[in-house]
Image (cartoon, grey):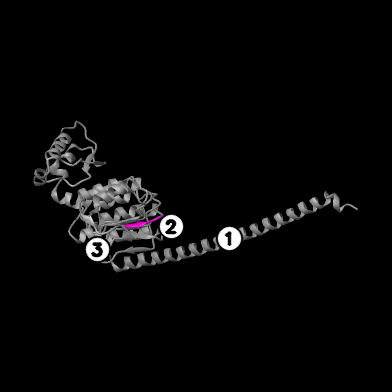
Amino acid sequence: MSHRTLYLLHALRSWPSPTHILISHFPLQHDSDHHSSPIDPPIKLVTLQLSSKRADLDPSAMADKSEVDVLTSVLSAMTVRHHDEHLVTQRPAATLKEILEKIRANKDQIRELDLKDMAAKKRKLRPAGGDLVGRVFQINRTVLRLLLPGHDIGDVGAKAMGNMLRANNTLQHLDLRGNEITGEGAAAISDALYGHESLEHLGLSSNKLGDDGAKAVAQVLPYNISLKYLGLANNGIGEEGGKALLEAILQNRSLVIVQLVKNDIPKDVLDKIRAALVVNKLMEKKARRDEEKELKKDEEREKELARLREVVLNNQNEEDSSSDSEDDESLWI
């Protein structure tokens, strides 16, 4: 690490009331690199709001080697969906930090951030990274799909996701499978879904929600009309949690898919949940058909109005032409 970087870290620790963490735009230099070049390159800084806690600025807390490695991990590609929603382009390799900077600034119209390949390669976000991603997404208004399966973000990351959902009404798809989230984290996410209008897909399978987490999720379902998919498979949910979910689903008309395999919910409760979801699917199809009929009627009305406007315009042109003929002295008898 260069002398200049060490000085910067020392200065950060001495600030009286820090409210940001400054993450260098370029990778930190090693001392060997410093000796090979007598002049340090300029350090361009990007500010990411993380916490007002002084402890977060301690290099031992913020710059754990594994966390730095994750931020500087190179992603093979990122998906960018432009305004037409059809053009999908693959951008050149970029680090996670570079992508998060663009997402934070709402640049490049990024529609999806998928980090499952990073987790598969053991480059996991863990709680600190989950907290960072959640804070970045609080101010993003372009990304529709955020996929973070297998990153072990825990309840700390789950709480950051809950705070993010309170501020973000753009995200439609959130995948948090396999993240060591317990009932506490599930409650933090669920509390953010009261009246939420954009999130349609919430994946919480293969976590540690248990009955407490299932009940926390169930509590919000009667008050949410956006969720269509809810993944709760492999979460150690028993009869108590299953019954809470059943009661909630009976009061919810938007959910059409709820994944509950690999839990300990009694078969009779699961059968009732399936029946309730079938009713929701039928109602969704009916609502879609009714909407299509109304759209067709609107199109027919617009066509009729356009035809009437054309008739009126033609009549007006004929009247104007007749009036011009009467004023033409060459036609007088």
Q: Residues within 10 Å of mark 1 (few under 14, many from 20)?
A: few
Q: Which mark is residue 299?
A: 1
Q: In the orientation shown, which residue stands out farthest toward the front?
A: 330
On the image, numbered disc 2 is attached to which residue?
84
Q: Residue 66 placed where, x, y %?
A: 15, 51
Q: What type is the residue that disc 2 sits on?
A: Asp
Pointers 3 and 2 in contact (CB under 8 A)?
A: no
Left of 22 or right of it: where is 164? right
Magenta-drawn segment: 79-84
Position of residue 14 relative to residue 235, above or below, is above
Q: Residue 154 placed where, x, y %?
A: 21, 52
Mark 3 and mark 2: Cα distance apart in space? 37 Å
**Residue 123 highlighted magenta (yes or no):** no
On the image, numbered disc 3 is attached to which residue?
234
Q: What type is the residue that disc 3 sits on?
A: Asn
Q: What type is the residue that disc 1 sits on?
A: Glu
Pointers 2 and 1 in contact (CB under 8 A)?
A: no
- Callout in the foreground (3, 2): 2
The earlier-in-sequence mark between 1 and 3 is 3
Towards the viewer: 9 or 209: 9
Residue at 27% of width from left, 53% of height from top?
Answer: 186
Mark 2 and mark 1: Cα distance apart in space? 23 Å
Q: Residue 213 placed where, x, y %?
A: 27, 55
The earlier-in-sequence mark between 2 and 1 is 2
Residue at disc 2, secondary structure: loop
Q: Residue 40 placed where, x, y %?
A: 15, 41
